[in-house]
Amino acid sequence: MEQSHVSALQLKHTGLERQIESELSRPSPDRAIVQSLKKRKLRIKEELAHF
């Protein structure tokens, strides 16, 4: 059970990283979106650190 949760978190983390990269590659990236994505990514990273 824990392993599937960790795997799901890792997938979410990777997906958020891709979204951040995509937003930053736009001509005029929306900094609010980037900041929100980074906060979500950090929360997942902190949760992963507990495993």
Image (cartoon, helix red, strand yellow):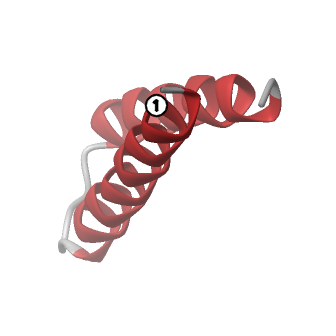
- Residue 11 lies, with reference to residue 2, above or below; the image says below
Q: Name the residue nearer the viewer: 18 or 47.
A: 47
Residue furthest right in the image: 50
Which residue position holds label 1? 5
Type of the residue with mark 1: His
Secondary structure beneath dot 1 equals helix
Instruction: Please give the count of numbered marks on the rendered protein.
Output: 1
User: Residue 32, percent across and down?
Assistant: 34, 30
Quadrant where the C terminus sits is: top right
Label 1 packing within 10 angstroms: few (<14), some (14-19), many (20+):
few
Q: Name the residue nearer the viewer: 19 or 15.
A: 15
Q: Name the residue nearer the viewer: 5 or 47.
A: 5
Residue drawn at point x = 46 percent, y = 48 percent: 7
Residue drawn at point x = 48 percent, y = 26 percent: 1
Residue 10 shown left or right of residue 27 in the figure? right
Residue drawn at point x = 46 percent, y = 27 percent: 40
Q: Quadrant of residue 3?
A: top right
Residue 39 shown left or right of residue 21 in the figure? right
Residue 30 shown left or right of residue 47 in the figure? left
Q: Quadrant of residue 37?
A: top left
Residue drawn at point x = 81 percent, y = 24 percent: 50
Residue furthest front in the image: 1
User: Residue 31, percent across and down?
Assistant: 37, 41
- Residue 28 lies, with reference to residue 11, above or below; the image says below
User: Residue 30, percent across and down?
Assistant: 25, 45
Q: Quadrant of residue 33?
A: top left
